[in-house]
Image (cartoon, helix red, strand yellow):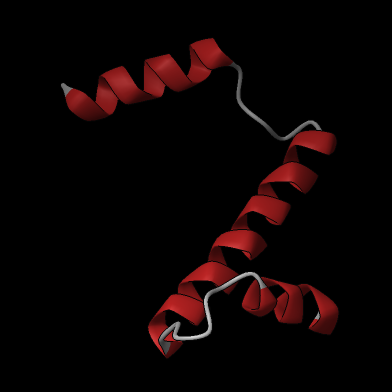
Amino acid sequence: MKEFVLQAIRDLPEDASLDEIMDAVLLRVKVERGKRQIQNGQGLSHEQVRERLARWLS
């Protein structure tokens, strides 16, 4: 995890703010979590997403 966070920081510009660093790390953590969920069969199909979105927007 430490190397994961350090790489996220290295990929940012030198003048990145603390908020930008935290956002970048959090985004990467969430993307990795999503990838694991999909690998474990916990993802949603395109149709399921469309149905949920339609309910949220109505």
Indicate whether 27 appears above or below 3.
Answer: above
* Nearer to me, 12 or 19: 12
Q: Position of residue 31 (x, y in %)?
A: 64, 51
Residue drawn at point x = 45 percent, y = 82 percent: 16
Q: Position of residue 19 (x, y in %)?
A: 40, 83
- Relative placement, left or right, of 18 versus 14 is left
* Nearer to me, 9 or 37: 9
Residue drawn at point x = 19 percent, y = 26 percent: 57
List the single residue furthest toward the front: 14
Indicate whether 17 appears above or below 53.
Answer: below
Residue drawn at point x = 72 percent, y = 35 percent: 42
* Nearer to me, 15 or 28: 15
Q: Quadrant of the N terminus?
A: bottom right
Indicate whether 18 appears above or below 43.
Answer: below
Residue 58: quarter of image: top left
Q: Position of residue 29 (x, y in %)?
A: 65, 64
Residue drawn at point x = 53 percent, y = 84 percent: 14
Residue 51: quarter of image: top left
* Nearer to me, 45 or 32: 32
List the single residue furthest toward the left: 58
